[in-house]
Image (tube, helix red, strand yellow):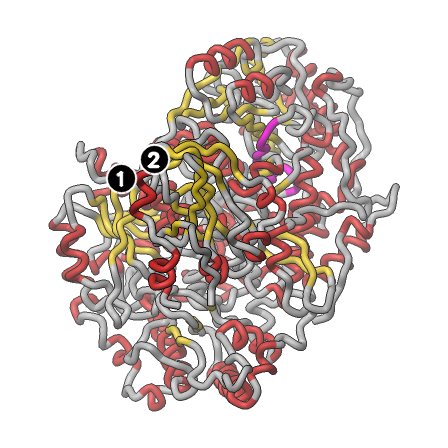
């Protein structure tokens, strides 16, 4: 069983969003990290980069695979989680504390298109 | 094979010399200006000649090559490399030629290129070859450049997409991207062949062409090739033939006759030049007559391509001659089908029927999984093969099957070798059924055991650091 | 075997091929030759080539190959292996590639090297693509006109299809013009600049201020180098370049009419994951032994397909081994001595040629090592020297002729060449 946290928003490409006012923290779900196996690198955008909902903003890499990260919301990256550069295994250890980027949202209404915890649970079929 | 742990840097002792140079008979030219001089220390090893020879001899003994044993690596055509070819390529009259020498000084080399062009045209049904590409992927890129140039020369600028089957080798889409083409995927049918109905709607006036391997990555002949060629040509596109799987067609079928307009050959696969641990290869590109005008102006490598490799391939073609060419294709196909039929009761064969030079199993029929012991995977089978003195097949490719095990025996293996391989594959299947842990822990008899690849990728150590 | 398969004859194995595609009749090939006949055939082809003393460089250098190298490189465990996919039985290949990477880092003064690329010009083309990928800027890359002509041509070909705009920095007074570089940088968004460490005239270039200027525009500086000369000339690392590329051929590889050679590439650590090509890394096995594996593979085409850093899926492994053994034999002193001998010989030839009165200086006082250009007073110099047994005085686009001297050229050979010039 994968861990799912109440109160977060979820995308079909397995990213989670934690909303604080106009700010969104974005990471990948526990389900996604399990699918990937040992994560060896997190490719992240730089501060100041614009991101668009539905567009790629980075990638997770394991030894034999690479998986795109798809941004659930549009906005500007105000911080990328530098800790993950040296310790990508943090995503495996606790996917919900290992946020990847912090985004200032330009269109918060995009959140409405995302799933809540129950819907995501049904989506992954666990 | 035994484990040997040194790196050349660890053989170094200050002041040791491994070189011998003539006395300096010239007046001293003076030094470079300080601003242009290297100040950083030059950390090269200092070793004697015997130390160098021992070190690399020891390293070589941890390697497995075609000369060591059977190497059924699917899609790589690891056939025997005849030794006369090595000697011919090293002849001083070839090895000493400077690449900028004009043709009047290199008539022998030019003759080799001419004869190779004629021979490859005869074998493939193409019109003309360029020998500049240094490898298969390099040939793909060159071929796609020619495809784009063809459309540009006709003033047709909107053809910026190329169709690639979902089962294709990763280099196909990657080469397309380097060439600035957008990749459009076409689905395979359950039998592994291109879905002609799915192809039809993709053939718009933005399609530059299609990249195909035939036989495809499952070793199956694309039986619909005639209608595919007609459809693509009718839509204004070109057909690219990836020569990675040319071996079974040698002496039997010519890509040019099937309607292909551009192709590359891997001289290091089909034409027996050694793989050299990953290269040098050679990927000459052949084109139909209508593309000949596109060849000038596309320069993809330093000079004339990998001449040394081309010489080896020429010697190989001369030794085959018109008499024996057909044996290459037929025996490669015979060996592959024989292995397939001999093992399909213990390994899952997803697609029945005659294959060409290679085929794909989808793992073990009985992987031995029980209680909390997981079953033996394709990786486990591959590693166990190493214990029995065989190289592993290609694994986890193509991606169409989760446990893909792709076997290509080539025509140069004897029936005895192939039977020994079959016996070992059956033994491994029995071991898996009895106790999959034997396989999980394999290999047992190699110089090293399975490596920690995760740590290698998380904390890359990519060069020698003293302590 | 046919019984097991359930077919009657070999032709039945092609029953899935439409009959019209089965080739009929004989192939238009020569008849098969025995080994002895092949030997005779190659001997006659070889005899059709001229056998001249080489006094030309221009991207391919006639340095000496110690006997140990072909001896070791022809060991079939190295020669007949493929890419080291099964690392448990490929530690030989993986270890020498790791050594090769370490040696290239040491020569260039940069942090990370890949397992090698096809040749120097394609390595420069890969560097161009990498500059665009790393900076995520408008795809415009500047090339110094001092780069060798074939390097420029290959980069231009790749750029044209990859959608990269190429700008040029001219050569003034024998070296890539710093002010022109700054002017080009100011014009537009530049992703990278490729400059030669030693240019097409043989001149060792001064790149003071280049890195700062390029970095100020957030571009990458790429140095195209002769790796043999890096033993004595300022390194890409010392120039603060981001990428070093070039051809490994001067490190003891035979001329072989242009190939196989080996492209090298080394980069600063921060660009490691955008680098094309195979990379070998160190790790441990289950039993704790130091072992080597292919690593950082998520960059590569078999995983990323069209999003890979490059389409390259091999390296020039055997030539990388060749270079590794060469550098091991030469060591720091040997490689410096090769440069000393070549440089002294070239300066001797330069002085002697000027004394003949048949040439004018083009770049007086400019520093060079083994290669230089002069302006001939009469045409036909190359053909005249050919008749005397020399491949020398290669004409350039500008109407100069170029010469090169390596440690293989003796004083007697140089004197004979000068004599042939004088005798016209």
- Name the residue rendered at 56%, 16% in the picture: C213
Task: Tell whether position A45 is magenta.
Answer: no
Tell me which corner region of the image, top left, top right, bottom left or bottom right, holds residue C20: bottom left
Question: What residue is shown with label 1?
Answer: B148
| Residue A96 is at least partly visible in this image | yes
Residue visible at 54% across and 50% down in the picture: A97
Residue B109's x, y, as percent? 46, 44
Q: Position of residue A109 (x, y in %)?
A: 31, 39
> What span is colored magenta in the figure?
C241-252
Labelled disc at residue C226: none
**Whether marks 1 and 2 lie on the same chain:** no
Q: Quadrant of the C terminus of chain C?
A: top right
* In-image side of B54 versus C52 (left or right): right
**In terms of depth relative to the viewer, which is nearer, C181 or C370?**
C181
Q: How many marks?
A: 2
Quarter of the figure with the N terminus of chain C = bottom left
Depth check: give the residue in front, A19 or B377: A19
Kindly check if marks 1 and 2 are in contact, taking CB atoms under 8 A apart as contact. Answer: yes
| Most foreground residue, C69 or B186 | B186
As for residue C245 lying within the magenta part, the answer is yes
**What number is the disc on residue C161?**
2
Q: Which residue: 41% across, 38% down?
A: B300
The chain identifier of the residue carrying mark 2 reads C
Task: Identify the element where label 1 is drawn.
Answer: helix
């Amino acid at each position: 069983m994968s861990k799912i946290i109440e109160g977060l928003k979820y995308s079909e490409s397995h990213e989670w969003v934690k909303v604080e006012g106009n700010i969104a923290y974005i990471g990948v779900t526990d389900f996604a990290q399990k699918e990937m196996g040992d994560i060896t690198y997190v490719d992240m955008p730089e501060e100041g980069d614009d991101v668009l909902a539905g567009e790629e903003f980075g990638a997770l890499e394991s030894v034999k695979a690479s998986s795109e990260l798809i941004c659930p919301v549009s906005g500007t990256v105000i911080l990328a989680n530098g800790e993950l550069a040296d310790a990508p295994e943090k995503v495996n250890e606790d996917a919900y504390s290992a946020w990847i980027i912090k985004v200032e949202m330009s269109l918060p209404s995009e959140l409405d298109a995302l799933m809540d915890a129950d819907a995501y649970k049904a989506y992954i079929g666990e | 094979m035994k484990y040997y742990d040194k790196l050349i840097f660890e053989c170094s002792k200050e002041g040791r010399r491994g070189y011998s140079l003539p006395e300096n008979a010239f007046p001293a030219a003076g030094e470079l200006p300080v601003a242009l001089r290297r100040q950083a220390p030059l950390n090269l090893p200092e070793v004697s000649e015997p130390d160098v020879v021992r070190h690399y001899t020891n390293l070589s003994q941890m390697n497995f090559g075609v000369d060591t044993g059977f190497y059924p690596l699917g899609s790589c055509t690891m056939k025997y490399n005849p030794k006369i070819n090595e000697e011919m390529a090293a002849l001083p009259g070839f090895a000493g030629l400077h690449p900028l020498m004009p043709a009047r000084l290199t008539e022998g080399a030019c003759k080799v290129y001419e004869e190779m062009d004629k021979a490859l045209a005869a074998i493939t049904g193409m019109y003309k070859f360029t020998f500049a590409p240094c490898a298969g992927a390099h040939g793909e890129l060159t071929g796609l450049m020619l495809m784009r140039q063809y459309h540009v020369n006709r003033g047709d600028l909107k053809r910026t997409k190329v169709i690639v089957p979902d089962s294709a080798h990763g280099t196909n889409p990657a080469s397309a991207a380097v060439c600035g083409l957008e990749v459009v995927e076409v689905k395979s049918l359950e039998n592994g062949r291109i879905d002609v109905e799915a192809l039809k709607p993709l053939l718009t006036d933005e399609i530059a062409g299609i990249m195909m391997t035939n036989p495809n990555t499952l070793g199956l002949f694309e039986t619909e090739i005639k209608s595919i060629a007609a459809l693509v040509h009718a839509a204004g596109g070109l057909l690219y033939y990836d020569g990675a799987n040319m071996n079974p067609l040698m002496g039997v079928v010519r890509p040019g006759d099937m309607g292909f307009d551009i192709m590359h050959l891997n001289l290091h696969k089909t034409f027996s030049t050694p793989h050299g641990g990953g290269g040098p290869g050679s990927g000459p590109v052949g084109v139909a007559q209508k593309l000949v005008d596109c060849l000038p102006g596309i320069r993809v490598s330093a000079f004339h391509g990998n001449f040394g490799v081309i010489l080896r391939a020429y010697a190989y073609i001369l030794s085959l001659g018109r008499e024996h060419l057909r044996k290459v294709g037929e025996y490669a196909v015979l060996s592959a089908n024989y292995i397939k039929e001999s093992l399909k009761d213990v390994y899952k064969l997803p697609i029945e029927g005659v294959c060409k030079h290679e085929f794909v199993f989808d793992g073990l029929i009985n992987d031995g999984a029980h209680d909390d012991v997981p079953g033996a995977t394709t990786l486990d089978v591959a590693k166990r093969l190493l214990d029995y003195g065989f190289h592993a097949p290609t694994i986890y490719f193509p991606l169409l099957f989760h446990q893909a095990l792709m076997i290509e025996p080539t025509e140069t293996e004897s029936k005895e070798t192939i039977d020994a391989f079959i016996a070992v594959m059956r033994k491994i299947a029995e071991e898996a059924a009895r106790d999959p842990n034997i396989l999980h822990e394999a290999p047992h008899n190699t110089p090293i055991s399975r490596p920690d690849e995760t740590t290698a990728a998380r904390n890359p150590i990519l060069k020698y650091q003293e302590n | 075997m046919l019984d097991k398969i359930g077919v009657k004859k070999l032709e039945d194995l092609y029953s899935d091929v439409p009959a019209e595609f089965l080739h009929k009749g004989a192939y238009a090939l020569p008849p098969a030759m025995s080994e002895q006949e092949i030997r005779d055939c190659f001997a006659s082809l070889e005899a059709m080539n001229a056998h001249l003393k080489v006094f030309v460089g221009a991207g391919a250098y006639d340095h000496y190959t110690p006997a140990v190298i072909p001896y070791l490189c022809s060991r079939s465990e190295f020669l007949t292996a493929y890419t080291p996919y099964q690392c448990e039985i490929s530690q030989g290949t993986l270890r020498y590639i790791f050594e090769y990477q370490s040696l290239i880092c040491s020569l260039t003064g940069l942090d990370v090297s890949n397992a090698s690329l096809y040749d120097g010009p394609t390595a420069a083309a890969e560097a161009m693509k990498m500059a665009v990928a790393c900076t995520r800027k408008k795809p415009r890359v500047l090339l110094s006109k001092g780069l060798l002509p074939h390097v420029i041509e290959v980069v231009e070909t790749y750029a044209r299809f990859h959608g990269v705009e190429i700008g040029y920095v001219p050569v003034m007074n024998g070296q890539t013009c710093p002010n022109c570089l700054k002017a080009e940088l100011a014009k537009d968004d530049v992703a990278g600049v490729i400059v030669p460490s030693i240019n097409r005239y043989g001149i060792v270039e001064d790149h003071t201020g280049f890195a700062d200027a390029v970095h100020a525009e957030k571009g990458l500086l790429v140095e195209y180098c002769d790796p043999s000369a890096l033993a004595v000339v300022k390194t890409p690392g010392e120039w603060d370049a981001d990428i070093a590329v070039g051809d490994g051929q001067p490190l003891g590889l035979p001329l072989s009419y242009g190939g196989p050679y080996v492209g090298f590439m080394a980069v600063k650590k921060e660009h490691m994951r955008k680098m094309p090509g195979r990379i070998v890394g160190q790790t441990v096995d289950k039993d704790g032994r130091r072992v080597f594996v292919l690593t950082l593979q998520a960059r590569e085409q078999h995983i990323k397909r069209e999003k890979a850093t490059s389409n390259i899926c091999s390296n020039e492994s055997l030539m990388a081994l060749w270079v590794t053994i060469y550098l091991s034999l030469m060591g720091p002193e040997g490689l410096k001595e090769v440069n000393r001998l070549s440089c002294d010989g070239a300066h001797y030839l330069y002085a002697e040629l000027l004394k003949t009165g048949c040439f004018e200086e083009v770049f007086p006082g400019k520093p060079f090592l083994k290669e230089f250009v002069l302006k001939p007073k009469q045409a036909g110099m190359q053909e005249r020297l050919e008749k005397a047994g020399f491949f020398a005085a290669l004409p350039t686009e500008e109407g100069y002729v170029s010469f090169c001297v390596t440690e293989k050229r003796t004083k007697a050979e140089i004197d004979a060449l000068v004599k042939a010039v004088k005798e016209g």
